Each structure stands twice: as C-alpha cells, then as structure tokens.
C-alpha cells in the first residue's frame, strides 16, 4: 500500500523566474517605441488651455513649434515676469518670429514646404496681445496654417 | 587534445540589464499633447474693396479685457454662446436664390440669409486671456461641428468629425480617402467656416 502514497514534501516548489526577462523586455520595447525625445527644454511656463473640438496635429516633420508664456520661475530673475516667446532654446522678441519661420521652412524638404503647420503652444495665462502679435508676424511670412495646441478637456474649465 | 565543452553563459543578469533600460525609458517618456484647434489666418493682402455685407449676416462676438462676452450687443455667458451661434448659422432666412433648404432654424428675416453668407466676427482685446479666447474659439468650432454632424448624419449616416479624422489620419488608405474627400467637401460647402477675426483693440 505504501507504494501508492505520495511522499509529501512540506515545501512549495520555487516559482520559476525564467520568463522575467521576457516580460521586462516586452515592457522595455513598449516604452522604447512610444518615447518621444524632447527636442527643446522649456524655458516658459506651459500650462495649455482645454478644448474638446480638437484635431490631431500633422506628422511631426510638418510642424513648427512656437512656445509662449511667462518665463519659468528659475528664469524669472533674468527675463522678468512678462510673457515671452520661446523659439528652439531661446527666449526672443516678437520680431524674431518671422525670420525663424523662414529659416525653419527652408530646412524642410521641398515638397513639405507648403504643408507646414505652426503649432502655438501658449500658456493659458497669457494675454491675447502677444498672440495677436505672433499671428501678424506669421501672416507676414505667409505661414497661415496654425494650430492652437490644447489639452483634451471641457473648455469651461478654462474659466475657473 | 581533448575536446573542451564551452561553459554556458549565465543569463541571470539579463533581467537586471533590461530593468535598467526600462527604467531609463520610463523616466524619459513624455506623452506629448499633439492635438489642438486648427485655424487658418487670412493672407496678408489688402482687403478687396466694395464688399458689402449686410449687418444681419454678421454675428459679432466681442471679448473684453475682463473676459466678458458681448454677443450681438448683449452680455452673454460662455455656455450660451454655442446655442446662439447655431441659431444664427442655421437660421436660413433668405428667399429665392438665397434660400437654404437644409436649414432648420427660425427663418428670422432679421438674422442670417444662409450659412454661406453668415459670418462670425470675433474681436478680442489685447488683455483678453488666452484661455478665454480658446474657450470661445472652441464653442464656435463646436457650433459648426454640430451643424455639420447633423447634415452628415442625414446624408451619409456618419459624423463629419469622424470623416474628417479618418481623412486626416495618415494610416487611412488612399481608396477610402478618395471616397471621403467629396463627402467632406459637400458638407463643408453646406456650412462653410467663416470666422473672421478683427485685429485686437489696443487701449
């Protein structure tokens, strides 16, 4: 009879960790593919407003970014607290927008040059005067397609 | 010489290396907000002369420096703006050549003739805050989208915004795009977006 009774060992068998690298690699590849490297660090506060009638932006190589807002706290001692425009890594004056657009446009491939969109990433707490000035500059260089980049959300949250 | 067996490489530390990389990418990832309101600026040309637009075909929205809205000379809350814009665009008060047979509005002779003639004029102050401006823009675009979706659902059984999204998506194949283009153009012709922005007042 003792032939059929299984010997019971009190210990649980250890969990195999052989598949752990596979799981980690899977996660790794996911993050590697979704990662977008930032190409410029922000010098301005950039709390975007909310909107819900939004359209997705074009491919990245067809977009020129313009940032605007109050300088971040650590730069306020140098640049003051009034809203500024950031192009690439510099805070500039409104008059620098038009040359910047022309320069960026000439960098793009010929067939894309007419399809460019200018994305305005402007802090919600900015006066319209600055944005109107930017728009006038953009009109001068015929960069007429613009996109006010916003966050997805109810627009009434802007008023709070 | 005796054949030596190559010892197996210990792969136990592979997980550690992968974790290291994983944590690096986790930290550097920023999910970008790449969506917003598309707008088109008017070209920098002198305006055409002698264009006469009837007062009743213009829907004026003024935002002052205290972020208050004046719609058609009346102080209005933002939440009422969308309905007011829809009522104006959808009015269809024209007769004869200017009639609008797809409009479902009140047909008030004092309001717009048809959507093609209706112009929304937006004026803001230099001290208006950007977030209010975006909220107003959003409501006006929403009014257009609401009307376009209504017509699009009636004719094609599909939302206009959905068609537009598919059309702009680079992953959509070209056959579907060719199919969508005339549909989108047809709806856009029924309710063209005529949103004019006056240069801001400075005071």
Image (cartoon, coloured by chain):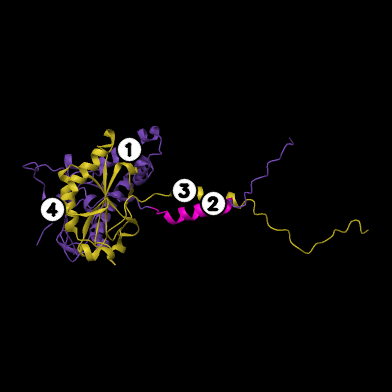
C-alpha gap between disc 1 and disc 2: 50 Å
* Letter of the chain that mark 3 sits on in the rendering: A
Residue ID for mark 2: B18
Q: Secondary structure at mark 2?
A: helix
Q: Which residue is mark 4?
A: B199
In the picture, one chain is yellow; tell me its letter. A
Residue B181 drawn at (x, y percent): 32, 36
Task: Please name which of the two marks, 4 or 2, marks the residue nearer to the observer.
Answer: 2
Left or right, B73 with reference to A121 = left
| Tag 1 secondary structure | helix
Secondary structure of residue under mark 3 = helix
Chain under numbered label 1 = B
Circle 2 residues within 10 Å: few <14, some 14–19, many ≥20 = many
In the image, residue B25 lies in the stretch drawn in magenta: yes
Q: Give the extent of the magenta segment.
A: B14-31
Colour in which chain B is shown? purple
Tell me the tag on residue A59: none
Q: CA distance from mark 4 to mark 2?
A: 56 Å
> Label 1 belongs to which residue?
B183
Q: Position of residue B145 (x, y in %)?
A: 30, 49
Closer to viewer: mark 1 or mark 2: 2
- Name the front one of labels 3 and 2: 2
A2 versus B119 height, above or below: below
Q: Badge 3 is on which residue?
A: A32
Where is residue B164? Give x, y as percent.
34, 43
- Between circles 1 and 4, the one closer to the viewer is 4
Quadrant occupied by the C terminus of chain A: bottom left
Q: Secondary structure at mark 4?
A: loop
Q: CA distance from mark 1 to mark 3?
A: 39 Å
């Amino acid at each position: 009879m003792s032939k059929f009774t299984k010997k019971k060992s009190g210990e649980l068998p250890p969990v195999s960790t052989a598949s752990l690298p596979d799981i980690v690699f899977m996660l790794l590849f996911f993050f590697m593919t979704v990662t977008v490297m930032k190409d410029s660090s922000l010098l301005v506060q950039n709390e975007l407003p909310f909107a819900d009638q939004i359209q997705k932006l074009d491919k990245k190589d067809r977009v020129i970014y313009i940032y605007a807002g109050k300088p971040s706290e650590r730069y306020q001692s140098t640049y003051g607290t009034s809203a500024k425009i950031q192009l690439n890594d510099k805070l500039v004056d409104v008059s620098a927008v038009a040359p910047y657009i022309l320069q960026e446009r000439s960098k793009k491939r010929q067939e894309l040059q007419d399809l460019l969109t200018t994305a305005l990433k402007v802090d919600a707490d900015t006066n319209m005067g600055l944005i109107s000035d930017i728009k006038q500059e953009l009109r001068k260089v015929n960069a007429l397609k613009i996109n006010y980049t916003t966050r997805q959300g109810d627009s009434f949250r802007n008023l709070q | 010489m005796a054949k030596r067996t190559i010892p197996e490489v210990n792969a136990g530390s592979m997980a550690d290396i992968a974790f290291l990389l994983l944590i690096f990418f986790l930290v550097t990832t920023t999910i970008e907000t790449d969506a917003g309101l598309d707008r088109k600026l008017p070209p920098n040309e002198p305006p055409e002369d002698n264009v006469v637009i009837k007062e009743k075909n213009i829907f004026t929205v003024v935002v002052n420096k205290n972020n208050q809205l004046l719609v058609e000379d009346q102080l209005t809350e933002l939440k009422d703006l969308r309905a007011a814009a829809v009522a104006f665009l959808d009015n269809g008060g024209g007769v004869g050549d200017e009639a609008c047979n797809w409009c479902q509005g009140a047909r008030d002779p004092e309001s717009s003739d048809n959507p093609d003639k209706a112009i929304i004029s937006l004026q803001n102050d230099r001290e208006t805050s950007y977030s209010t401006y975006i909220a107003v823009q959003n409501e006006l675009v929403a009014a257009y989208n609401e009307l376009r979706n209504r017509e699009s659902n009636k004719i094609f059984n599909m939302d206009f915004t959905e068609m537009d999204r598919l059309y702009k998506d680079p992953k959509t194949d070209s056959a579907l795009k060719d199919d969508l283009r005339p549909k989108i153009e047809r709806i856009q012709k029924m309710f063209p977006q005529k949103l004019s922005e006056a240069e801001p007042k400075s005071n």
